[in-house]
Amino acid sequence: MKIQVILGRPLSGKTQRIIDELNSVSGKSVLLSLENPKDLMIQRGLNEKIMIIDSDDITQEEMETCCNQNAIEVIGIDYIEIMPLHLDLQALLNSLKETSVKRILITSVLTRNDQMTDHLKRRIGLLQPEYTRI
């Protein structure tokens, strides 16, 4: 499973980048969007065929069930700093290893010094993602 983190300063286009990436997927995708509600993401150009979860009370089990029942290929998380702490990224990835999920896209904000936040470093842990700076 490929993990890609899209890094950028505030208002640098991270959300638009994840929208564009998800729109280009031919299979099914889901976006966990905690900063912007579903209607705004669609106004910003997210294809309506993409499932959007804009609730911060989603459980690990519900996320896994959503991916399994809908044959999700790509998961988008916009953005990791506000992803609920009860969602363990490592545990989620482990539970999805034998599923149709092939890729996870995560947006994250850079600090004023163009560094990754400590929160990102803790949440990503040992996952060894690919980083893209915008």
Image (tube, grey):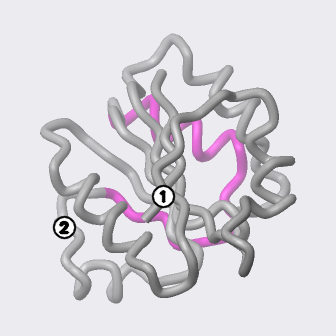
Residue at image coords 51%, 11%: 98
Q: In the image, is residue 68 above or below residue 39?
A: above
Image spot of residue 31 (x, y percent):
42, 58
- Which mark identifies residue 46? none
Left or right of 106 in this view: 100: left
**In the image, what residue type sits under mark 1?**
Arg
Q: What is the quadrant of the C terminus in the image?
A: bottom left
Seen from the viewer's position, the closer of residues 134 and 20 is 134
Q: In the image, is residue 129 above or below residue 96?
A: below
In 3D space, how far apart are the residues under numbered discs 2 and 1 (Cα atoms)?
Answer: 27 Å
Left or right of 57 in this view: 3: left
Q: What residue occupies the far front of the structure in this picture? A: 113
Secondary structure, mark 2, is: loop
Q: In the image, is residue 100 above or below residue 38?
A: above
Q: Quadrant of residue 41?
A: bottom left
Image spot of residue 17 (x, y percent):
33, 65
Badge 1, how many Cα within 10 Å: few under 14, some, many 20+?
some
Residue at image coords 74%, 31%: 90
Residue at image coords 86%, 47%: 122
Seen from the viewer's position, the closer of residues 39 and 106 is 106
- Which mark identifies residue 48? 2
Seen from the viewer's position, the closer of residues 118 and 36 is 118
Residue 67 colored magenta?
A: yes
Image spot of residue 84 (x, y percent):
76, 63
Region in magenta = 51-70
Mark 2–mark 1 CB contact (< 8 Å) = no
Residue on which the image places disc 1 = 133
